[in-house]
Amino acid sequence: MLLKHNNLIIRNATEKDAEKLAMWWNDGKIMAHAGFPNGTGQTAQSIANSLQEDTDTTHRRLIIEMDNMPIGEMNYRNKGSQTVEIGIKICDFSKQNKGVGKILLSMLISALFKDFGYQKIILDTNLKNKRAQHVYEQLGFTKLRVNENSWTNQIGELQSSIDYELYEKDFINFAK
């Protein structure tokens, strides 16, 4: 995948990105919302090996670039029945809260509907992540349920999440 919009690029992650991904994934500040306040502990080599398994039809890790510099990552996973699950992390904190995530998500969502033929996009987010919830709802996602105390992070704290879904007819594209 290679998507471009103004100064933003979304591209397939490659083995060359493994060092950067390891740096981000092992940073507890970046990964706390995903349940890893101490980071994931993954090595660049293990990430490089796992990237070799990515395919367009099963799952794909993506790198987000702004002005040709990596600022975060996205991913998608085919869940079957023309449904795909997505995720995003803007890892460069200086690029957060500037509307970039909404545009990047619009770019990815548009491609998944139009180019890949998915009919439904799903995701979940931590109940505490109000900023992400706001963005998802602006894009047209519908809140399905709140999962109270449904999982435990790596330091034993109970966490709650929200499940969302989006159909193409409800999608509001901010990357036109």
Image: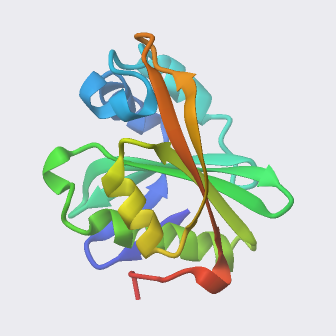
Up-down: is 167 above or below 131?
below
Q: Left or right? Give the position of 1 relative to 10.
A: right
* Residue 171 in view here: yes
Judging depth in this view, the residue of 143 and 72 nearest the camera is 143
Residue beneath the point at 65% across and 80% down: 168
Vertical arrangement, residue 141 with respect to residue 6, above or below = above
Q: Where is residue 146 in the image (x, y as percent from the top left)?
A: 57, 46
State the quadrant of the N terminus. Answer: bottom right
Q: Which residue is drawn at 13% across and 50% down?
A: 94
- What's the colour scheme? rainbow
**Where is residue 20 shown, x and y percent of the image?**
32, 33
Pick the residue in front: 101 or 44.
101
| Quarter residue 113 falls in | bottom right
Residue 9 visible:
no
The residue lying at 46 percent from left, 58 percent from top is 11
Residue 164 in percent (x, y) is at 59, 58
Q: Which picture quadrant has residue 176?
A: bottom left
- Seen at 19% across and 65% down, the residue is 98
What number of labels is visible? 0
Outermost residue on the left side: it is: 94
Image vertical order of residue 53 relative to residue 46, above or below: below
The residue positioned farthest toward the right in the image shown: 81
In this picture, residue 1 sits left or right of residue 8: right
Q: Is residue 73 above or below residue 172?
A: above
Left/right placement of residue 108 relative to residue 129 reads right
User: Residue 157 at x, y = what percent?
Assistant: 42, 17
